Image: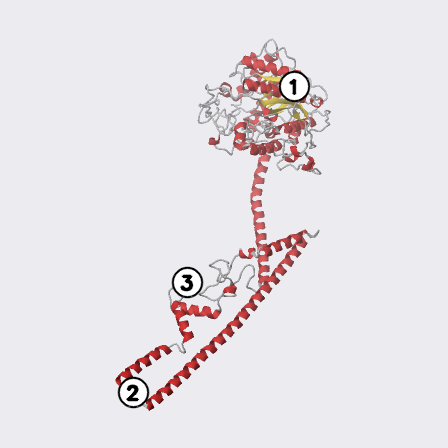
Amino acid sequence: MPSRDDRDSPARRQRRRRAHQRVDSNSDLLPDRRRERRRDDDATSPTRNGPRRQRRRESRSKGTASDSTGLSSGQLAKLDQLNRKLGDDNIYATRTRQDHRERRTDREDVEERERVAREADRERRRQEHKERKRRRQQEEAAAAAPAGGAGIAVVESKHRRVEETGGQRRRSSRIVSGQTLERGNERYHSDKEPYRDDVRRRDGDGSSNDSDFEERERKRKKRKKIFIGVGAVLLLLAIIIPVAVVLSSKGSSGGTSGGAPGSSNATKPTNGNLAGMSQSDIPQSAQGGLLDPFGWYDTNDFNVTYTTAQIGGLSVMGLNDTWDDTTRANDKVPALKDSFAYGTMPIRGVNIGGWLSLEPFITPSLFSGYSTHDNVVDEYTLTSKLGSAKAKSVLEQHYSSFVSEQTFADIQAAGFDHVRIPYSYWAVKTYDGDPYVSQVAWRYLLRGIEWARKHGLRVNLDLHGAPDGDLNGQRTLDIHTQLATFFTQPRYKNIITMYGLVNEPRMTALPSQKVLSWSQDAITSLRQANFTGIMIFGDGFMGLDKWQGQLQNNQNLLLDVHQYVIFNVDQLVLNHHDKINFACGGWTQQTLRSQNIATGFGPTLCGEWSQADTDCAPNLNDVGVGSRWEGTLNLASSTGVGGSKDGSVLSPTCPSQNRQQCSCDQANADPGSWSPEYKQWLLMFAEAQMHSFEQGWGWFYWTWQTESAAQWSYKSGMAAGVLPKLAYERDFDCSQSIPDFASLGLSEDY
């Protein structure tokens, strides 16, 4: 594209514009050969019509010569006179045209000088504008950063970049008016219209009022930012205020979940203990790894001093060098440093489920974002779907937020003296093909133990997830050896007083003798690693009466049973009166028989129970499946407890056995909407179970908190008034009569 310096003069363009009116639309693109021939004739002939007149005279002259005998001397004299006259006129015309051309050239020279002067003046104004803008930016930067010249340096550097790029920023400016509106903002000239100097541009080119325009633009943008900011604030208020009202109303009614995950630590941890440290303090080979605290999501209450020390092949990083075992949970139990009289002093504990070993009904938010096609139903499928990096990020945030020190403080305040902490083998190690997040849960487990110590709570460690099969049975033994070696350190003697071999081995589906043999091997491995605490094994769903004579030669071995009335259809259909009667009669008698080594195993504990009288909690039976209560439990591909052979229950099993009335609505409703009669029954049912299980070694409630399943959350039940405020203070025991709740108006459908 030609530049402005390459343009023809205005006069020449004007001639082209007039010529364009006489030709078609393509004439500007093709050379006008007729016009060039005319210019050549003009340059060689005295007058434009001279040759034509000459030919006419010659024709007349020839005609005359042929018709006459010749001219007289007088006629010749007149002819010579006429020729001289015509010759003088031609000479005069030629001189006149030459004078015109000279004057035109002079005029064009003057116009060219004026154009150059205008261009120089515009360039001067541009430079002045740039200088003013640069100074203004320097002043603004200096005002924003009075401590030094950093802001000015940035402005000057930015200004130099604009100059060095040859004004590229101007070429990207938006055109607001003028002849370049349709063609864009390239500088160009048209053969069809003269160049105009009144094109106005955002960068101020071609205007003497650029500084005023820039000032107006700056003020306009500032006003725009203010309006946007005010609008954003109003929008946030419109969202925050209703949400706060809703949460406040939920809190006043006791809530439905005992607090969303991380309610005690909802924001990202401050990690203030990293202050004064640098990642360069960590060996380069360890940076970004498990021992690099700068890669941890949460470092609060961890010792972040780098160390590679291990015990039993397990890292001790994060632990402090000192500990205090003088605290006690309440005045009903001894301090940690003193012995707990197991067997005579009842255990009153609570599980911290869904934390280090996920369960979808406890934290449905981790599973709710997937479709049935994704098949995300447990921690294995969740981590497989997320991938290793995303899974680590998601689960570490969950580990950090779902449980905090306040969790243990609240448990102590509720009158508990023990906590059962479920964890899975991938807290220790993973194997080829495992999608699990490896070893991240380990440091959160260690921190949780220290928080329990701080509040006088003894810990029951329970391996909730173990590898399956013969090969993995040996792997599980190896993991137990590592863990036993680690927890035989003196610091854990008074706090890790109970240790579970594996949670709920399904001996109804596994060879019972193989499970018994493995259990004995695990007990031997732990004792060889010098673990002296109480070891716990599960009843395997065989029932307490089946364990007489089994594993009884081991010291400090405790049988663990999990008692619920909702996973067996024969118990689920019991009415409200009979459920309490079953807890007081059936479970109490089972416990007493199991405690007697002549009729049962001996020491017996209830490691899990709840006050729920339905299996209505979403995801309780599996992600996305229904309930026995409503007759919508479809487990065609799995094996369940109770109901059909595959575990499915497709007929309603509430006490009325009425499809229309067996509804989960009330069971899953906010506790604030429960009737007084239903709340009375829930509290009495819970206290009856506590009384029954204390006929043995005691109990652990399942669980402390959930996101939405209120009947499975001690925290929510306590807030709703359907669980004791203090675990050791109760109004009901099984020596009292049980009311007829139907006569009190409590429907048997919920």
Mark 2 packing: few (<14 Cα in 10 Å), some, or many (20+)? few
Q: Earlier in the sequence, mark 1 or mark 2?
A: 2
Can residue 730 be seen by looking at this rendering? no
Residue furthest to the left in view is 67
Q: Which residue is mark 1?
A: 346
Marks 1 and 3 close (CB-CB < 8 Å): no
Q: Which kind of residue does numbered mark 2 sit on?
A: Gly
The image quadrant of residue 596 is: top right
Residue 301 rendering spot, x and y as whole percentages:
68, 32
Q: Which residue is mark 2?
A: 70
Marks 1 and 2 close (CB-CB < 8 Å): no
In the rendered structure, find residue 625 and report the number of the disc placed on it: none
> What is the spatial separation of the Cα atoms under label 1 and label 2, in whole angstroms?
161 Å
Q: Nearer the viewer, mark 3 or mark 2?
A: 2
Q: State the residue in front, 30 or 265.
A: 30
Q: Nearer the viewer, mark 1 or mark 2?
A: 2
Q: Which kind of residue does numbered mark 1 sit on?
A: Pro
Can residue 593 be seen by looking at this rendering? yes
Q: Which residue is mark 3?
A: 29
Looking at the image, is 605 positioned above or below residue 134?
A: above
> What is the spatial separation of the Cα atoms under label 1 and label 3, in whole angstroms?
105 Å
Q: Which kind of residue does numbered mark 3 sit on?
A: Leu
